[in-house]
Image (cartoon, rainbow, N blue to C red):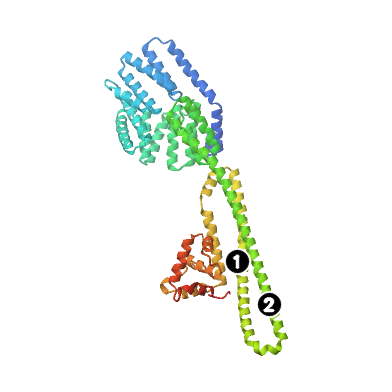
Amino acid sequence: MRKGLLIALLIAMVTTVMADGKKSLADYCKQIDEAIAHSADYVAAHEKIIGEAKHALNFEASDKGKYQLNFQLYELYKPFVSDSAMYFLGKCIALADKLGDASGAVKCRSLMAIKCANIGMYDEALNILDSIRPVGIDTLTLGVYYDAYSNVYSELAYYTRLDLMKQKYQAKADYYKQLMLKTMPETYETCFLRREQDAQGEGRLEEAMAINNQWLKTVEKGSHPYALVALYRYIEYKLQGDRDQMMYWLVESVLADIRNAAMDQGSMWELANELMLMGEIDKASEYISFTSDCANRYGSRQRNWQIAPLLTHIAKNYKSQSEATTTQLRLMLVAISLLLLCLLGVLFFLHRRNRQLNIARMELKGKNTELYTVNQQLAEQTEELSTLNSQLSTLNSQLSESNRVKEEYIGRFMSLCSQYIDKLDNYRKMVNKKMKNKELEDLFQMSKSTELKEKELEELYQNFDSVFLHLFPNFVNDFNALLQTDTQVHPKEENRLTTEIRIFALIRLGIEDSSKIAEFLHYSVNTIYNYRARIKNGALDNRESFERRIKELGTIQ
């Protein structure tokens, strides 16, 4: 019976762990939203505890008892309202001096310096510390004194923009940190914090996690100290790349802060930043607004400085995503319109060529009829007729070749237009889907990339090369036969043309204008001129007649 009960309990525990491990972002946000909805209740409960401590203070007669109650109020206000915490800490300093408690006076002044540094009052913090004479105090208080110096210089090193001062401040911070670590017990919260930060900074992640595991055992789950341990545990898993665990511990820290009515919320700021990176801009904005209100109540300039850039970035993301989507749609419409205009131009050109061919054929028919009717003049006009027939045959051949080229390219062009319209529609569906799913970061990255344009250009040139070599399979060999050996051009890939050969392929098709060639190949006009001049300089014979001979190369297959 007991064995069956143990198995059932084990299965239940495994199921619970698996369920927790599979929590989605929506589940986490739901937990946080519920905590925020009850935040006023948590604040009221905390204010009630503060009220009870103040009431007790009013009836306390001894200076020692007053010192203890004022220090208790400092601890209660420490994460709640910065100014009030400093006020009661000032009361503690006055009472410690009155009692002749050197350790208490040094401890409270050191804590006052830390509070000043935490809200950006660096000059005041250093003045307080420089006024302290750490004589006749206990070892633990000396550690607090060293930690205060380390804290102030760490803050200065983090926020200064001058590299020289950053190095100077960091060196002092490290010096006092080592003194603190030698003085305080390893199980003290500050020692856990500094040791874990050092291990993280030096890449000793296993050691950092081991320190955090020890630290976690010393705090009560859900308490305010637990929030700090959970925040650093989030950082540990973030450095390891474990996203599931990282989000779990970040949310644990956020919930502990809210439920303990903490107004100085570093974890909520981190969560808003993570959500923004995931593209969850609405939730990020909601949470950063909540933590901004808390920071204003707490009275921390540093936290407001951290929050302000994130709020600005969220607003810019809203605007840029909207503008990028609108611009893309407009560009697609313009591209489709241009393609349709090009298609109409090609159809008009083909119609005109066909009319010219019909006229030429009608003229030829008329000439033949006239020749038959003037049979008596056949002898005198035989030579003239032969010449005329030769000219007409050449014209007919050119027209047939032109028709074949136009038919081949128009067929391929219409196929490309149809494919491009399908691609645009698929792209529209994909954009619509991502907008519905709020995958705005993906859309933003796609709108920045030129990969689509480069891919389409490569496909266009590949189609051009394929059709041209299908029509003129010997063009590359014939082209190189007109050039000196050291200037000949050989494509690296089969059934592909180089840029130089592609320019003269267009000339072979009758497109001689450098500006039109530059437009098709997406080069500057000067670049096209340079390519043409360089190739002509390598011609075997007269360079002036080189392009004319190019036009005569090959016969259509």
Badge nearest the viewer, 2 or 1 = 2
Whether residue 387 is situated above or below residue 64 in the rendered picture: below
How packed is label 2: few (under 14 Cα within 10 Å), some, or many (20 or more)? few
Q: Secondary structure at mark 1?
A: helix
The residue that appears at 35% across and 21% down in the rendered structure is: 108
- The answer to whether residue 122 of the structure is visible from this angle is yes
Which of marks 1 and 2 precedes in the sequence? 2
How packed is label 1: few (under 14 Cα within 10 Å), some, or many (20 or more)? some
- The image quadrant where one finds the N terminus is top right
- Marks 2/1 in contact by CB < 8 Å: the verdict is no
Instruction: Give whichever of 84, 75 is nearer the camera.
Output: 84
**Which residue is tagged 1?**
409
- The answer to whether residue 439 of the structure is visible from this angle is no
Instruction: Give whichever of 112, 386 is nearer the camera.
Output: 386
Q: How far across and down, in percent of the image, does residue 119 sit? A: 41, 27
**Which residue is tagged 2?**
363
